Image: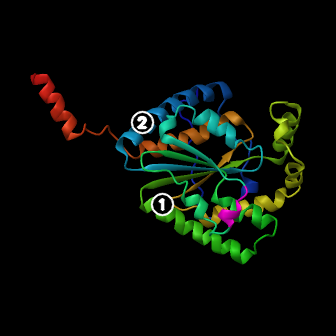
Amino acid sequence: MAKDVHLLQPVEGRPRLDRIDPKETHGLEEKAAKAVLQRDVQALSELHDLLYANGKRALLIVLQGMDSAGKDGTIRHVLQGLSPQGTVVSPFKQPTELELSHDFLWRVHQRVPAKGTIGIFNRSHYEDVLVVRVHHLISDKVARQRLRAIRHFERQLTESGVIVRKFFLHLSREEQAIRFEERRQDRRKNWKMSAADFHETQLWDQYQKAYQAAIEATSTETCPWYVVPSDHRWYRNLAVAKVLVHTLRELKMDWPPPPADAAAAAAEETKG
């Protein structure tokens, strides 16, 4: 049984992605882990209801990773029980002309979750220090400036009541090749593939370096990064769920009392 499930620790100092095993499961077995995940999915649903009812804090979940690391799968399996009225998923694709005419965080700030809700970024503002850096569309100097801006931006969010949790879904190059082949043979998925996907795999080392720099520069006590071993989908899902449940439980939320006018109206109705 997985009664004492390992809770991932946030990144501190300088991470060495090449020393973190993407196949790590901390001794858990798939069958037991999936049972624990179902309990955590239910716990997340209940905690989300409390968050929504209180309306004082918001939770922003940032998912980053190499292509096929499982961002969509994490959303599907971990966050399936969340109420749609209090959840917003925001994918960040190539910026539009309007978005490019503003600073790089302009489009991001508009999608920050409101108090009482959970926002999920499927890719995020970090694309502007990853893809553009790997493809030499910005200089290292500009990348460092943007990383500083991101730190300030995320600190501002926490000061206004938004809890930020960031997950790097750490996939091995070998597992990515396996998943690409699975995708290529699946009619339900291969329509989404492009030549660019395969070209990006040739830049693996550059992306790992860019991710390491971004995580090192922006993992803080209030807005931590978690490096999630993701070669095993079931472990990835459980690890993310554990962190989110722990984060929301730390808020020690309780159900708010009914509005005064509602309580008064109920009392009058009882008298009548």
Picture disc at residue 49: 2
The percent position of residue 30, horizontal first and vertical second, equals: 67, 28
Q: Residues within 10 Å of mark 1 (few under 14, many from 20)?
A: some
Q: Furthest-front residue in view?
A: 98
Q: Secondary structure at mark 1?
A: helix
Q: Which residues are magenta?
A: 94-100
Q: Residues within 10 Å of mark 2 (few under 14, many from 20)?
A: some
Counting residues from the start of the chain, the first of labels 1 and 2 encountered is: 2
Q: Is residue 271 above or below residue 190?
A: above
Q: Hey, which quadrant is residue 148 in on the image?
A: bottom right
Q: Residue 202 or 8: which is nearer the viewer? A: 202
Q: Is residue 11 above or below residue 184?
A: below
Q: Furthest-left residue in view?
A: 271
Q: Residue 42 or 114: which is nearer the viewer? A: 114
Q: Is residue 264 above or below residue 90?
A: above
Q: Is residue 25 visible?
A: no
Q: What is the three-letter code of the residue carrying label 2?
A: Asp
Residue drawn at the location 60% of the way across and 60% of the way down: 107
Residue drawn at the location 64% of the way across and 59% of the way down: 125
197 left or right, relative to 1: right
The percent position of residue 246, horizontal first and vertical second, equals: 48, 43
Residue topped by disc 1? 157
The percent position of residue 166, horizontal first and vertical second, equals: 59, 52
Residue drawn at the location 58% of the way across and 70% of the way down: 149
Q: Secondary structure at mark 2?
A: helix
Classify the position of the C terminus by image quarter.
top left
